[in-house]
Amino acid sequence: MDTTSGLILIIALAVVIGIVVWIMSQRRRTENLRKQFGPEYDRAVTEHGDQRRAEAELAARQARVEQLHIRQLEPADRERYSATWRSTQARFVDEPAVAIAEADRLVAEVMHARGYPVGDFEQRVADISVDHPDVVSNYRAARAIALANERGEANTEDLRKAMVYYRALFEDLLDMKEREVAR
């Protein structure tokens, strides 16, 4: 074998190794994003219509939230918010529409206290999906019902579902998560 053939073989081998490493890193990235985002991963793929674009969006969310100063609540704040939630739930019996509006405001207040920006709803959902992927779909559903409620289009069963969805997110926001501590 001459020098040129040996050089071509080495270059070809390097290219093949590079491609294999790239494919493995892409698979690992996909696996990590699926694990972190859970059902939100599939939703993003469906929404974007392309796995690469969805993964880029999810990675951008992750990077954005890493720049935020997300913090745990102090025990006194956690207890105060819990008491407010119990009051809001109790109000549901007599005034379900009012209770849903209060639940929506309380969730936003807790998010703000934790350090999440609370301006635009879609940005709020994207930010929450990083640390709370299992309940972000609940938040979307609860918010849709709350908006229907504002238009007078939600019935009592809809409002009950919204309260359950808000409670799942609320409880998740109050609990300490291992991944947040690790960050």
Image (tube, rainbow, N blue to C red):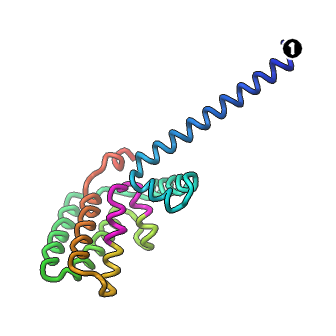
Q: Is residue 140 magenta?
A: yes
Quarter residue 53 falls in: bottom right
Q: Residues within 10 Å of mark 1 (few under 14, many from 20)?
A: few
**Residue 82: percent from left, percent from top:** 18, 65
Q: Is residue 178 left or right of residue 183?
A: left
Q: Is residue 151 above or below residue 27?
A: below
Residue at left offset 47%, top offset 54%: 62
Q: Is residue 99 above or below residue 175?
A: below
Label 1 element class: loop
Q: Is residue 14 above or below residue 141?
A: above
Quarter residue 85 falls in: bottom left
Image quadrant in which the N terminus is located: top right
Q: Of residues 163 and 176, which is closer to you in this image?
A: 163
Q: Of residues 71 and 14, which is closer to you in this image?
A: 14
Residue at left offset 37%, top offset 54%: 131
Quarter residue 101 falls in: bottom left
Image: magenta residue range: 126-142
Seen from this angle, which residue lies furthest top? 1
Magenta stretch prevailing secondary structure: helix
**Residue 100: percent from left, percent from top:** 25, 77
Q: Is residue 136 magenta?
A: yes
Q: Is residue 2 left or right of residue 127?
A: right
Seen from this angle, which residue lies furthest bottom? 152
Residue at numbered disc 1: 2
Q: What kind of residue is marked 1?
A: Asp
Q: Is residue 35 left or right of residue 142?
A: right
**Residue 148: percent from left, percent from top:** 33, 81
Q: Of residues 60 and 1, which is closer to you in this image?
A: 1
**Residue 40: percent from left, percent from top:** 42, 56
Residue at left offset 55%, top offset 52%: 51
Looking at the image, how many numbered discs can be counted on the residues? 1
